[in-house]
Amino acid sequence: MHYSRLKFLTFLVSTFFVLSSYPDTVECANKKGSQNNAASAPPPPPLEPEAVIEEVNAKQLEKLLNDKDYVAVFWYARSCVTCDKVLAELEKIDDDTDSFGVDFVKINDKRLAKQYGIKNFPALTYFREKEPIIYDGDLMDEEGVLDFLTSLEAMDLPDRIEEVNAKILLKIIEDTDFVAVLF
């Protein structure tokens, strides 16, 4: 297959996924002569998901690691002022990580942190199929953290055909030359 055809097919697939990710919504205008002419209040604005990183305990974290392929864990201590500042920055990317299929949680458990090699707080560990990767970059740089958590290298699970959402597919198409898609 020629490279230009592959690019065109890739474009079609990505367009399909982008369009299929939007819910089907149709608004109907009141027809002239409608019997309901009473002024109605405009619909309330849609609620945006709250950008709060969920608190978990050791048991919940274990279940999450067993159930999910990608989990980001923010380790903190209650009396840590730096932890609070970092958490405020990381809260800004929580919805973004969700859209890439990465569950982002926080935990205050020094014993468990020690088991995963965490010696200082705050810290961030990225679990990919239960395998921990400790983030060694600047935790105050939320864009750097987001890039770390959503890079194709970080999300690649070798020897597996993965189900991806539209956002991940677009990132794969942008970052790679060839993509095989199975519907």
Image (cartoon, helix red, strand yellow):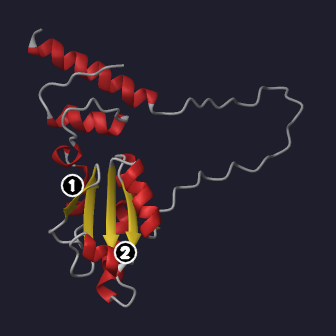
Q: Residues within 10 Å of mark 2 (few under 14, many from 20)?
A: some
Q: Which mark is residue 15?
A: none
Q: Relative to the observer, which residue lies in front, 8 or 100? A: 100
Image location (x, y in percent) of residue 107: 39, 72
Q: Which mark is residue 88?
A: 2
Q: Relative to the observer, which residue lies in front, 181 or 32? A: 181
Image location (x, y in percent) of residue 88: 37, 74
- The residue tagged 1 is 147
Q: Quadrant of residue 137?
A: bottom left
Q: Quadrant of residue 112?
A: bottom left
Q: Secondary structure at mark 1?
A: helix
Which quadrant, please, contains the C terminus? top left
Residue type (three-letter) at the residue carrying disc 2? Ala
Residue found at x 38% / y 31%: 18
Q: Is residue 49 above or below residue 171?
A: below
Q: Quadrant of residue 131?
A: bottom left
Q: Quote the CA–CA distance across marks 2 and 1.
A: 18 Å
Residue found at x 51% / y 56%: 49
Q: Residues within 10 Å of mark 1 (few under 14, many from 20)?
A: few
For the view shown, which residue lies furthest in the bottom direction? 79
Answer yes or no: do the residues labelled 2 and 1 have beta carbons within 8 Å?
A: no
- Point out the tag, 2 or 1, that comes first from the N-terminus: 2
Which quadrant, please, contains the N terminus? top left
